[in-house]
Amino acid sequence: MLSDWVLHGLEFMATSFVFIIGGAALVVVILFVIDITQTRNAIRRNFPVLGRFRYLFGRLGEFFRQYFFAMDREEMPFNRAEREWVERAARGVESTIAFGSTKNLNVEGTPIFLNCPFPTLTEDAVEKLPLEIGPYCRHPYLAPSIFNISGMSFGAISAPAVRALSLGAKMAGCWLNTGEGGLSPYHLEGGCDLVFQIGTAKYGVRNQDGTLSDEKLHSIASRPEVKLFEIKLSQGAKPGKGGILPGAKVTREVAEVRGIKMGEDSISPNRHPEVGSVETLLSFIAWVRKVTGKPVGIKTVIGSREWLDRLCEEIVLRGLESAPDFLTVDGGDGGSGAAPMALMDNVGLPLREALPMVADILVKYRLKQRVRLIASGKLIAPSNVAWALCAGADFVNASRGFMFALGCIQALRCNRNICPTGVTTHNPRLQAGLDPHVKSVRVAGYCQSIVHEVEMIAHSCGVSEPRALRRHHVRIVGGDGLSRSMDELYPSAECSDEGGKDGF
C-alpha cells in the first residue's frame, strides 16, 4: 500500500516536472516572439529573453548597489544618474527626484546657479528668437535652437541611428551635424537643418588625391537642408590626430559616401594640408564660403591661446567679413569616437577652462557678435548647458546625450562594431534593434527637455530667457569646498559691441 502511494507520488512529480518544464519553455517561446517582433527596445530585440535580465538586474541594483556596484554619481565618463536623467527626458517621463540630491556639491568645479528672490514668471518669459549666423554670406542662417546635435559621422554610427537623429532633429527644431564622414541619404531623410563638417580627409567633398573638390562642395551646398559648413581642425577625442574609422566599419555604403575603399581603415590626416597658419586658415574659410554661399565656421580643441590672438588680429586687419561665422570649441577630454588613450586623456584643455577663455578673446577683439560661439564636449545635462551659456556660448552641441536618447548603454564598444544597441555598429542583426521612428521621438524629447529645463534655470536666476544668463549668475566650487562667482574667476574683458554680452 505504501509502495503504491510512493509510486503514485513519483508519477505525479514526474508529470508535474514535465508540465513545469513545458510551461517554462512555452513562456520562453512567447517572450522570444514578443521581444523579436517589438521595436521599442533594441536590447530585447537583439537579444530576445536574455535582454530582459539587464533590466531585471538594473531594477535590483538600487538595493544591492552599495554592496556590489558603483554609486549613482561615481561612474565615468557618464554616471548612472546622468544616463537615467537622459533616458527619462527622452521618454518624456517625470524627471523629479525625491529625498534630496545625490550629487556631491562640494566637488571642485561644480556650478551653483544663484536663484533670484523674485524669479521670472512664466507669463513674463521671452520666447527665444532665432540667432543669425553668417551675416556676410549670400545665404545666412537663422538658427532656432540653443541646443543641437554634434558631429557623429555616418560610419562611426549606423544608418538607423543617423535616420533617427535626422527625424528627431526635425521634430525638435534643432540642427544635426553630419560629422566628417560625408552626407548620406539618411541625413537627408528627416528634412532637418544640417551642418556639413569638412574633416581633414575631405570625405564627401574630396578629389581622389584627397584635395577639396569645388564641384562636390558646390553640389552639397545646393541642398536646401545644408545650412552651415564646419571646418574641423581638431576634436575632443584626439586633438592633433585625424579621424579613425576601423576597416570593419567601412562597408560598401560607407565607402561610397566617403569616397574611399571598402574594408580598409579610414585614417584622416592630422590636419588640413592647405591650412598651416592663421592666414591660410582664413583664406580657406573665405574660399569655402565663396563656393558654397553659406556660413562657414571652424571646430577645434583649444591648446595655447596665442594662435587665437593671432587669428583675431588677422581678422581685424582683413575686416569683419573675413572672420569665421562661428567657432565650435570642443573639450579635450574625449568624444564619442575611437582615439588613442594618450590623446583622449591628456591633450587639449577641458571645456570648462577653454570656453571662458575663447569668449574673452572674442570680446577683447570686439568679435563676439560677429563670430557665434558654440560649446561642445560632455554637455548632456541642463546644468551643463546653462553653465556654457553663462560662460559666453551662443549655442551648445552634444553627441553622447543624443546617443543615450537612441538607447546607448555606455557599453564602451563603439570602436569594435559590436554595439549591443545598434547605435555604432554595421551588423544588420544588431542594427535591427534600433527602430528609427521610435527613437526619433526620444531624440526630440531629449532636446526639448534640455531646452525646457535650461529655461527653468534661467527663470530661477531671474532672467527672461537662457541667453540672458551671465557669469554673475553662477558660482563655481573651488578646491576648498567654497564657491566663487564665475565673473570673479573669469573676469571678462570690457565689451564695447552694441548689444554685446557685457561682462557675460
Image: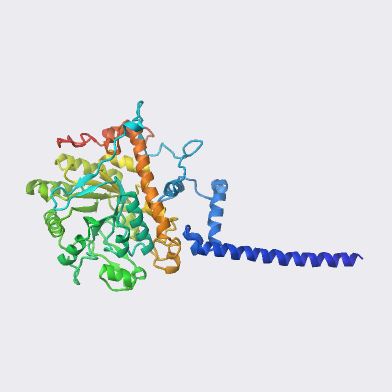
Quarter of the image for residue 480 reads: top left
Would residue 370 be visible to someone looking at this image? yes
Q: Position of residue 9 (x, y in %)?
A: 82, 64
Q: Height in image: 26 above or below 365?
A: below
Q: Position of residue 218 (x, y in %)?
A: 17, 63
21 relative to 41 in the view: left or right: right
Choose between 113 and 351: the one closer to the eye: 113
Quarter of the image for residue 487 reads: top left
Q: Position of residue 435 (x, y in %)?
A: 43, 60
293 relative to 343 in the view: left or right: left
Extreme residue in the right direction: 1
For the point 25% across and 57% down, which residue is it?
Answer: 225
Q: Height in image: 452 above or below 300?
A: above
Tell me the quarter of the image containing the N terminus: bottom right
Tell me the quarter of the image containing the C terminus: top left
54 relative to 87 in the view: left or right: right
Would residue 303 be visible to someone looking at this image? no
Quarter of the image for residue 387 reads: top left
4 relative to 413 in the view: left or right: right
Q: Position of residue 227 (x, y in %)?
A: 22, 54
